[in-house]
Amino acid sequence: MDFMTALDISASGLTADRTRMNTISMNLANVKTTRTPLGGPYRRRTVVQVATDVDDPFSIHMRSALDRELKGVRVMSVNIDNRPLKRVYEPGHPDANADGYVFYPDINVVEEMAHMMTTQRNYEANVTTMEAIKGMYTKALEIGK
């Protein structure tokens, strides 16, 4: 594997982690949102990631036996979670139904924070990898002097 391929793999991870972090942030920001532009309460979102090739069509033919199975990651979709809504009795709330119940998104703050911490660690690992690659590239240039 060459330096550029390693950078491409880490960059794909950074991009996917950024999307995942943005989605988690949206979920946390909308924990109490009972009304959206589409109508009804906010629905929790999740990110679906898939492994993907990091090569362009030309470089596929130039691969060696050592780097045939290298994969990056990409965001396939951001899905709306189908968890049932939480029903809370709040008769004075403007979005309460006739029985006095308000429907809130079923977002567990502890779960979202755990996902956020995992995503943050993934992001940090990809940044560390990129810094190591940059260091190796610099050392390789110094050898050539």
Image (tube, grey):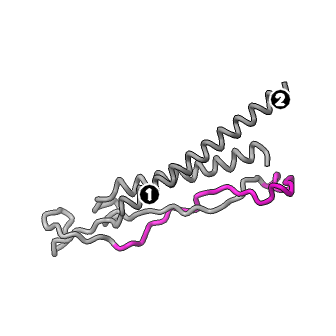
The amino acid type of the residue labelled 2 equals Ile
Residue at 53 percent of width and 50 percent of height: 121
Tell me if label 1 and label 2 are in contact, CB under 8 Å: no
* Quadrant of the rendered image containing residue 135: top right
The residue lying furthest to the left in this view is 92
In this rendering, would 5 be left or right of 23?
A: right
Q: Earlier in the sequence, mark 1 or mark 2?
A: 1
Marks 1 and 2, how far apart at CA: 44 Å
Count residues near mark 1 (Cα–Cα under 10 Å), then give few for <14, some for 14-19, many for 20+.
few
In this rendering, would 125 be left or right of 103?
A: right
Tell me the tag on residue 114: 1
Count residues near mark 2 (Cα–Cα under 10 Å), then give few for <14, some for 14-19, many for 20+.
few
The amino acid type of the residue labelled 1 equals Ala
Q: Which residue is mark 2?
A: 143
- Give the percent coordinates (x, y) of residue 108: 36, 63
Q: Is residue 86 above or below residue 1?
A: below
Q: Secondary structure at mark 2?
A: helix
Residue at 82 percent of width and 52 percent of height: 58
Which stretch is magenta? 57-84
- Give the percent coordinates (x, y) of residue 125: 59, 47
Q: Secondary structure at mark 1?
A: helix
* Quadrant of the rendered image containing residue 113: bottom left
